[in-house]
Amino acid sequence: MAIGKSGRIVIEIDPEIKARIHNELKIRGLTLREWFLAQAERDGLAISKKKVTAVSKKMGAKSK
């Protein structure tokens, strides 16, 4: 898989799954970007930044 320097991540998924993900995130008040970064942090990837941590806290509050 090619890794560019643009800051974009591109994946190909079924359009129906994509729509369901976006709908669920909208209900939770999250963008795909916020959710992705928070999930990466939860999985222990070394990306910690204050904004990402804040989104993780936001997600934790919504899942309770």
Image (spheres, rainbow, N blue to C red):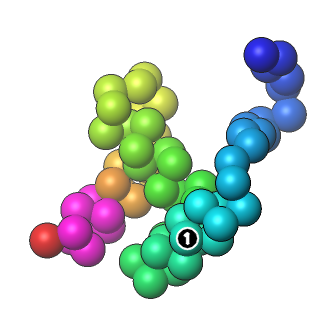
Q: Is residue 24 left or right of residue 12?
A: left
Figure quadrant of residue 39: top left
At horizontal 49% and vertical 71% (from top left) the residue drawn is 25
At horizontal 85% and vertical 34% (from top left) the residue drawn is 6
Residue 4 part of the magenta segment: no
The answer to whether 31 is drawn above or below residue 11 in the figure is below
Q: Main secondary structure of the magenta part?
A: helix
The answer to whether 19 is drawn above or below residue 18 in the figure is below
Judged from this view, the residue extending furthest toward the left is 64
Q: Secondary structure at mark 1?
A: helix
At horizontal 77% and vertical 16% (from top left) the residue drawn is 1
Whether residue 32 is visible, yes or no, is yes
Judged from this view, the residue extending furthest toward the bottom is 27
Where are the magenta residues, as a range?
57-63
The answer to whether 60 is drawn above or below residue 3 in the figure is below
Q: Amino acid at mark 1?
A: Arg
Q: Position of residue 20 (x, y in %)?
A: 55, 70
Whether residue 29 is visible, yes or no, is no
Q: Position of residue 46 (x, y in %)?
A: 43, 23
Q: Callout 1 environment at 10 Å: few (<14), some (14 to 19), or many (20+)?
A: few
Q: Is residue 9 left or right of residue 41?
A: right
Q: Which residue is mark 1?
A: 20
Q: Is residue 59 left or right of residue 46?
A: left
Q: Position of residue 64 (x, y in %)?
A: 14, 71
The answer to whether 14 is drawn above or below residue 28 in the figure is above
